[in-house]
Amino acid sequence: MLRKYFLLLFCGLFIVRFGESQTLQNLPQDYFVHPLDIELKLSGSFGELRSNHFHSGLDIKTNQRTGANVIAAAAGYVSRIKIEHYGYGKALYITHPNGYTTVYAHLEKFAPRIEEYIKKRQYEQESYEIQLYPDDLDLRVDQGETVAYSGNTGGSGGPHLHFEIRDGDARPINPLLFGIKIPDSRLPLVKQIKAYPLDTESTINGKNEAQLLRVISLGSGKFKTEPFSAYGEIGIGVNTNDQMDAASNQNGVYDIKTYFNGKPSFEMTFDRFSFDETRYINQMIDYEHFQQNKSRISKLFIPDGSPLSLYRETNNNGKLKLLDPEAKHTYKIAITDFDGNLSEINMDITNESKNEYLSLKDPKNATLVAHNESFSTTKGSFTLTIPKGTLYEDTFLNISENADVLKVHEDVIPLHKNMILNYDMKSKVGDDMGKYYIARITPWGAAYHVSSTLKGNTLTAFTKTLGTYGIRKDTNPPTIVPVNFKSGQWLSKNKTLTLKIEDKETGVQAYRATLNGKFILMEYDYKTDLITYDFSNGVSTETDNQLVVIVTDNVGNSTKFEANFQRKE
């Protein structure tokens, strides 16, 4: 039986990876079942626009509770287990005979036999955070089998299950394409429309600057904008969301098409993408508008150099050329959700004459940084390096230094790669240099630790965010406070040991706990600053116990906590 299963699995992988017989138009429709045994209500949809990434699955509500049964969507084997403090928290990956992999994330805990498998290896490695790749016969599962319980671990904003389906190349695919159904009869929402001049000669209503257009609802999913005039090459953007029947969350839409003078101009479909391309979301949206207004406008044209596979066939990359004086044009945006509910926006555009008196000046005190070349400059004790390909286009940046504070423009321009900040520490020699770090300083004066490395007399930090940076020193150790016990107590009725660990300046970097000299596994929830040991782990069965917890922050300050307690099972 095991050999037969392995043969089926291998054949399935061969078909998907090499034969490519299953395309997005020919996906299995009855292969996967719902991953929860409760009604499916979404708080997040596939491809939804998130900070620095597209959402790679479905976020399924669990009625604001943890502990719902998470079931295998199809038979297969557990091929990967990842437990981390941030990100997906506790996550389980199941590979199926047809070559697809399903992912279940933000879990509270795993089914008993999987939990036992994991815990054994966590204790062997003496680490809560762990990544495992079981063999195909280690943890086989049947369709509908409970494999875990829903939770709120990692970067989750509330109890839910994050569920994905990935193809043989580890690309996430919209699970709804596999026949998983979520009732949806609501029309997509239209919030904002914006017009953009795409070069220095182009204008919108006579100005070489992007402009929001007034959106007028006509009812039944029909909208129009106020008429406007334009010249040259322009682009349009839309802020849109979708709502489903059973939840009020504003999710992402499935497809956006545009038509210029009745002919197809642009299409973007949220059906599949690769993790390598997901950060290009910052080029696809109006990043400056989002940073200033916290609303995402999707550009309905392809920015130069974008590799996003979400784009479909376009005419002139979705960009509109308006060169004939006084010519009139129509432009339509058609937005659909996965169930085909349609909202349309119609726009009337009149060509305006070229503005011969348009005067553009380079930004004052700014430096032009090319996107296809490396750039480096020294300001005071700082050296800033912007590697080739970090910017999406040639950009003017304001860069200045004053009193050990480096200002690198403002966070209104996205970076695709890390820029590098080096600080010459010669002035700090003899002043406990290891406690210094580079901090990002907000407009309101708060300082946030940026991971920094000291080598010789140079302090280095990498960051993908423009803004203001300065030097800070942290000499304050973390704090450790017991939550559900006190030293000297009898704890026979306790099921857990819980402590609150905090470091308000640079954050907790590591922690380690022992009981009577033996390592114990403590789960860390950074959202609540709590670490918890479960007595069911059975590390010690002694009556008299000594607990030792050591917590270290990101510049090496550490705190040691000790407590004694008595306990009988």
Image (cartoon, rainbow, N blue to C red):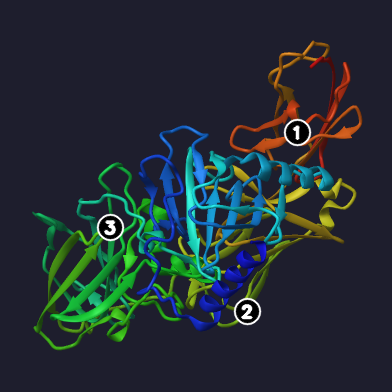
Q: Quadrant of the N terminus?
A: bottom right
Where residue 451 appears, as percent x and y from the top left, is: 70, 53
Q: Is residue 517 left or right of residue 113?
A: right
Where residue 40 appears, as percent x and y from the top left, is: 37, 45
Q: Residue at x 60, y 46 (%)?
A: 89
Based on the displayed image, in which of its 4 quarters is residue 176 positioned? bottom left
Does dot 2 land on a helix, a strand or a loop? loop
Q: Nearer the viewer, mark 3 or mark 1?
A: 3
Per the image, the residue denoted by label 2 is 374
Question: How many residues crowd mark 2 within 10 Å: few (<14), some (14–19), many (20+)?
Answer: few
Residue type at mark 2: give it. Ser
Q: Is residue 237 left or right of residue 567?
A: left
Instruction: In this rendered view, identify the residue nearer to me: 525 or 148.
Output: 148
Does dot 1 land on a helix, a strand or a loop? loop
Residue 365 seen: no
Residue type at mark 3: give it. Thr
Does dot 3 land on a helix, a strand or a loop? strand
Specify the label residue 240 is tagged with: 3
Per the image, the residue denoted by label 1 is 478
Residue 148 seen: yes
Q: Nearer the viewer, mark 2 or mark 1?
A: 1
Residue type at mark 1: give it. Pro
Q: Is residue 65 left or right of residue 11?
A: left
